[in-house]
Image (cartoon, rainbow, N blue to C red):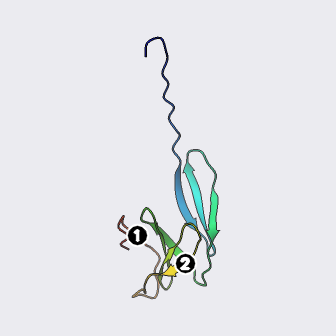
Amino acid sequence: MRGHDAWALARPTTYRASAVTDNARYSLVLSGPGNDEKRGTLNTSSSITDLAWDGSTVYAVTDSQPIRIDPATGTITPVGNLRTSTMSALAADAAGNL
């Protein structure tokens, strides 16, 4: 551009992680601008031990079963049964396979 300065403004990137307590889900800022946010209250009688996200759905595991958490409403839906009495970790791929 002749006679003009062109500036490209890069938008800062925010990196977040999800965290959960016994009754709430949070989005935590790891780096970049923004604030930690409470994303919803969870209604479960069991302790949630881990979260996994496949890009659109939040999955979690309690000590007795895997569950799906609607990110907009916090609604919990069971997605199966465990073949063990305790579970403390969970992972999901982009296709939603746990």
The residue positioned 61% from the left and 75% from the top of the image is 42
The residue positioned 43% from the left and 72% from the top of the image is 90
Badge 1 amino acid:
Ala
Given residues 1 and 46, the one toward you in this image is 1
Badge 2 amino acid:
Ile
Q: How many marks?
A: 2
Q: Earlier in the sequence, mark 2 or mark 1?
A: 2
Q: Is residue 98 left or right of residue 76?
A: left
Residue lying farthest top?
A: 3
- Which image quarter is the C terminus in? bottom left
The residue positioned 42% from the left and 86% from the top of the image is 82
Residue 58 image position (x, y, % from top left): 49, 69
- Which labelled disc corresponds to residue 81? none
Give the image quarter of residue 21: bottom right
State the SS at label 1. Answer: loop
For the residues labelled 2 and 1, say whether their Cβ atoms are less than 8 Å apart. Answer: no
Q: Residues within 10 Å of mark 2 (few under 14, many from 20)?
A: some
The residue positioned 63% from the left and 68% from the top of the image is 40
The residue singled out by tag 1 in the image is 91
**Does residue 6 sit above or below 21 in this rendering?**
above
Residue 16 image position (x, y, % from top left): 53, 54
State the SS at label 2. Answer: strand
The residue singled out by tag 2 in the image is 76
Q: Can residue 39 be seen in the rendering of this structure? A: yes
Give the image quarter of residue 45: bottom right
Q: Residues within 10 Å of mark 1 (few under 14, many from 20)?
A: some
Given residues 21 and 7, the one toward you in this image is 7
Residue 86 image position (x, y, % from top left): 47, 84
